[in-house]
Image: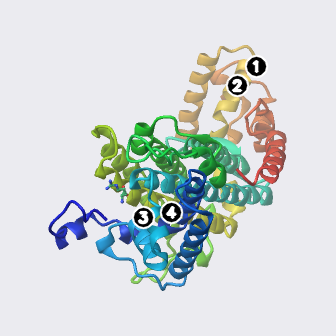
Amino acid sequence: MWKGRFQTETSNLVQRYGESISYDWRLYAYDIEGSIAHAAALVDAGILTKAEEKAIIRGLREIKREIEAGEFRFKTSLEDVHMNIERALTEKIGAPGAKLHTARSRNDQVALDIRLYCRAESQAIFQRLTTLQNALLTLAINHPEAVVPGYTHLQRGQPVLFAHHLLAYLEMLERDKQRIRDCYQRINVMPLGSGALAGSTIVLNRKIVAEKLGFPALTQNSMDAVSDRDFVAELLFVIAMAGVHLSRLSEDVILWATAEFGFIELSDAHTTGSSLMPQKKNPDVAELTRGKTGRLIGNLVSLLTTIKGLPMTYNRDLQEDKEPLFDSIDQIKLALEVFAEMMAAAKIRENRTLEATSDPFLLATDLADYLVLKGVPFRDAHEVMGKLTAYSLTEKRNFPDLTLEEYKQFSRAFEPDLFKVLDLKTALKARKAIGAPSPANVGSQITRWQKRLHAASAM
Ligand code: ARG
């Protein structure tokens, strides 16, 4: 492509080192779409005739068909997807093909291709986030009365509805969706026409290109446009954050699936056995997701590190944006899909969750609150309940089995109605401030999510 200035061929080693066709071939459909829009602007500027444009479109469509049929031979010597397609086009249709690159550089071309790719993939990720939300919501709806201990420090804290725990993940995934939607606005800006870095003396109507490709806005600085990868970094962050959420869900699932917790039974289809220990049923999907999150975070850091030292404007370093981007997108889409499938097929073992939640110590705070309502300052009530917990442990008798007289030794504020507090249903029902897990609240949250997910399936 640059044969004019050079006397010797690029060394084989350099070709192997610098090629990106082995991975950026995936951008072919966007590259072709972008070239068709660019051709329209060239017609408008009087560089191409209508007939030449037609030939270009026909040639590009043929190339697309060949690629999709597996008949196209990508050449490493042609470095990347842009040059492979352009060369093939010129071989097919001659002169019009050789005119296509007028007033365009691979620098603005690749910026456009990545934006088109990120645009499509953001939608795909958004939809999969919704699918997982729906799977978790269905699980909540199917177990409206299941209770679990809520944990802090992985120590049993207070009782909650299992649905409340699941809905916490819907909130996290909803924030991921908000972030994608927000990031999309900065992806959705059209860079073509920026040329290598300074536009072109052949002036194109960039609005034609933007309109053809459905971009609502144009980049406003040609130097920024060819070197900006902020939108890629943002998308990688959004993906890493969603990955972190999935990783935390993975950790919950892994714990729940242990014999010690036993809260959940994953289906055979979503677990694996051990080659050595015949009794094992391993939650590999969750473990892999937790593991792959390291990659998602790594990909974000990798791109930020690539960008941080770059002088203006385009530098070849930027070719290193694609592999982390492709990897994160592939991985998060798969992770979201497999998680939705796995959670939809999971069984909740309500007898086990109830057993764990029947630990009377989970209501120690409720008894402290009881004392507060009898006029005891909270700090004193907290101390009383701490001492009662120690007493109950040495006596080896649970809260419901202690007598009123014993309670009174710790605080005179205790009365016979204290025993009513020691009921799981009462305890849950009482937690009715906004955001708290009373059954009525959780019920209306479920309704809210049903409406919301039903109304907003597209981004
Ligand atoms: N393959 C290159 C990339 O991915 C395309 C742009 C190359 N531009 C250049 N001037 N060498 O970044």
Depth order, front residue of 323/398 = 323
The answer to whether residue 389 is above or below residue 239 is above
Amino acid type of the residue that numbered disc 3 sits on in the rendered structure: His
The yes-or-no answer for disc 3 within 8 Å of ligand 1 is yes
SS at mark 3 in the image: helix
For residue 340, side relative to residue 111 (left or right): right
Q: Residue at x 70, y 25 (%)?
A: 369
Contact flag, marks 3 and 4 (Cβ < 8 Å): yes
What distance separates the C-alpha of mark 4 from that of mark 1? 69 Å
Across and down, in percent, residue 321 comes to 38, 53
User: Within 10 angstroms of label 3, few (less than 14), some, or many (20 or more) residues?
Assistant: many
In this figure, which residue is indicated by the disc labeled 4?
A: 31
Type of amino acid under label 2? Asp
Q: Residues within 10 Å of mark 1 (few under 14, many from 20)?
A: few
Element on which disc 4 rests: helix
Q: Type of residue at label 1?
A: Leu
Mark 3 = which residue? 82
Is there any visible trace of residue 375 in the rendered image? yes
Q: Nearer the viewer, mark 1 or mark 3?
A: 3
Say which residue label 2 marks. 369
Quadrant of res 125:
bottom right
Q: Earlier in the sequence, mark 3 or mark 2?
A: 3
Quickly name the residue at label 1: 373
